Amino acid sequence: MNRIEFNTLVIRQSESLKAYARNFTRDQDDANDLVQDTLLKAVTYFKNFKEGTNLKGWLYTIMKNTFINNYRRVVKTNSFITKEEEITSANLVVSATKNRGENKFVMEDINHALSNLSEDYYVPFTMYFEGYKYHEISDHLNIPIGTVKTRIHVARKVMKKTLSAYKFSY
């Protein structure tokens, strides 16, 4: 099959491609654009078509993949670009979290709250936070395991009260 015969067969499929494209896009203009993209890719990649293969199925696969790729591109673009004149508070939150400025303040508050704990509570609490088990903390500090649990519990309550502005959920 030469290129002219192939192009003729592809063009004959354009009406069924339009109906198929409307299923994806739900819009006539977008469906026409999708068909046009599909036909362009089919003609461009004529060499990839194997004679004897179902042409309609091959075209449908090109269309489906084109639609999926375009959809992904639009979603990715829309997630990065704000199309509004004014930046909403929701978009400000997104941009503020990207530069991690808020995290610096949170960490300063956490470090301040930790520094206000007495050493009796600070050491077991930080050891537990770092991943030590109760019995390891008990052995290291030479205190009963029940005392370790109590001190960690009290330290949590103090931290939670000190950092109440952050409304932690457990």
Image (cartoon, helix red, strand yellow):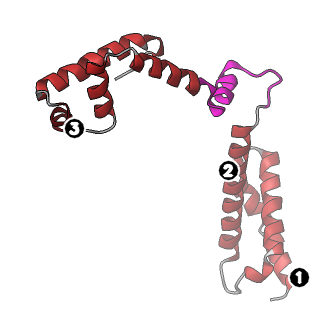
Going from the N terminus, do you reach mark 2 or mark 1 first? 1
Which secondary structure lies at badge 3? loop
Q: Which residue is mark 3?
A: 133
> Are dots 2 and 1 in contact, CB under 8 Å?
no
Residue type at tag 2: Arg
Which residue is tagged 1? Answer: 4
Marker disc for residue 161: none
Q: Nearer the viewer, mark 2 or mark 3?
A: 3
Question: Is there a contact, CB below 8 Å, between mark 2 and mark 3?
Answer: no
Main secondary structure along the magenta-highlighted residues: helix
Please tell me whether residue 148 is drawn above or below residue 12 in the rendered image: above
Residue type at mark 1 is: Ile
Q: Is residue 25 visible?
A: yes
Q: Nearer the viewer, mark 2 or mark 1?
A: 2
Magenta part of the chain: 83-102
Secondary structure under the numbered disc 2 in the rendered image: helix
Q: Earlier in the sequence, mark 2 or mark 3?
A: 2
Residue 55 is situated, as x and y percent measured from the top left of the image, at: 70, 76
**42 left or right of 20?**
right
